[in-house]
Image (cartoon, rainbow, N blue to C red):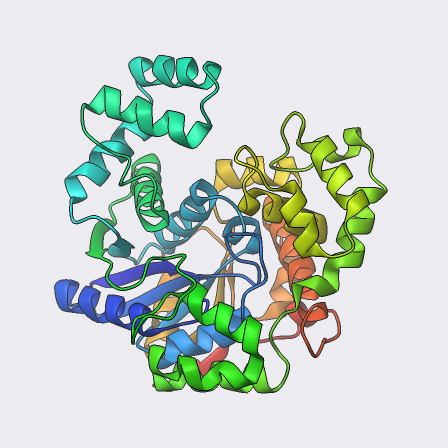
Amino acid sequence: MKVLGIIAEYNPFHNGHKLHISRAIKQIQPDALVAVISGNFVQRGEPSIIDKHSRAEAALENGIDLVLELPSLFSSASAEYFAFGGVSLLNATGIVSHISFGCETESFETLKLAADELYSESQEFSSEIKKLLLSGLSYPKARISALEKVLKITTSNILSSPNNILAVEYLKALQRLESNIIPVPIFREGASYDSKELSGTISSAAAIREKIYKSGASGLFEIEHTMPESSFEILKNRVVNGLTPDFDKTSYSIISFFRNSSPDDLRKLPYMSEGLEYRIIRAAEKSTDLKTFFHLCNSSRYPDSRIRRITSCVLTGATEKNLADAKKFGCPYIKALAFNKKGASLLKSMKKKTALPIITKPSILKNLTGFALDTAKIEARATDSYFLCLNSPRPSGMEYTTTPLYREQ
């Protein structure tokens, strides 16, 4: 049985995602599709445009049979954690045979070469990257230069685009897990991943979000053509009912936290490095809103995404130890967000194959132990923070009361 796995944010689900699914189906001809999607906080450390259950519903309406959750500990982390969490989850199901992902190069061989070298970290590569870092080069630039020297090929165009970086991390994760899952890259077309401008029927998720954040419900008619009808209707409903986030509502708690923290306190947070703690404290003292805070923190050394991930850790309580465990163990449970009749059958098959707890009822979350329980608690705090910063806020505790969506077809 062929089961295709996809790791995504679907933030929101748009025509580009639909195209990727259709091309993957044409190439693989799977019997079923499983998607692993981000929790309520996504990779840049921001709240998603609509909640995870709404995005799961959109996926279910557009060809996915079973939607699983990538907990916020992984989904709001850097590419390495995001990819390892997603791949480890698909691998742990015991039923996924293929994984398909978008990339911005048609040279799969180059992606594979880069992944192999980054995974093995040869002595030549390690020595070269240390030398480049000592010369003052940032880690991303040092990594590209070291790879180009070791592999004797140009990799800058590969390791500078977000989808390619993730593709390399997916391949690394498959190697690390010694997984039998077959990778199937799909060349990505249309607007670039981070483009903020709408561009025809296949626009980036970033451009769609930008329009909603700037224009609210009045901007809906401008994005309707960029999304499948069912996905657009789900987004429209959430926007009209105030169920989209205003991250600035967390300004007080975040800025107050940083103002009242010592440099020693901040050094205990994930993603912190020497000197950044002082920059964050100074920025918090001068800021009354998050836009100003992020602007003052941002630099070539400390990119915006890193600062946002630190703020998400403040909200969720994620620690360095949690991240170390995430890197060591991968995703510690299988949690269903939505499924149809075929997806229910997949869950039944998983029970015979996996060693991980399968969560189809929220009450099971409280019975977890160890790292799985830590991950679930972080997810619960992420959900509480998410629903508190909506334009129409919701009460806490929804992580333990929201059940998976089920559809016959």
Looking at the picture, how far across and down is residue 97, in whole percent? 24, 56
Q: Is residue 170 above or below residue 130?
A: below
Is 407 placed left or right of 100 in the picture?
right
Residue 303 in view, yes or no = yes
Residue 295 in picture, x, y percent from top left: 63, 48
Q: Whole-percent x and y of residue 104?
A: 25, 51
Can residue 370 be seen in this snapshot? no
Residue depicted at 41% across the width and 52% down the height: 86
Q: Quadrant of the N terminus?
A: bottom left
Residue 274 location (% of width, % of height): 65, 25
Question: Where 337 sits versus 163, above or below?
Answer: below
Q: Quadrant of the C terminus?
A: bottom left
Instruction: Report whether 251 appears left or right of 371.
Output: right
Residue nearest the observer in this picture, 297 or 402: 297
Q: Quadrant of residue 249?
A: bottom right
Residue drawn at 39 percent across, 74 percent down:
59
Q: Residue furthest right?
A: 260
Instruction: Tell me where residue 407 sits by quadrant.
Output: bottom left
Q: How many marks?
A: 0
What's the residue at 40%, 47% (across, down)? Answer: 83
Give left or right: position of 38 versus 65.
right
Instruction: Say which residue appears at 36% left-offset and 86% top-offset.
Output: 229
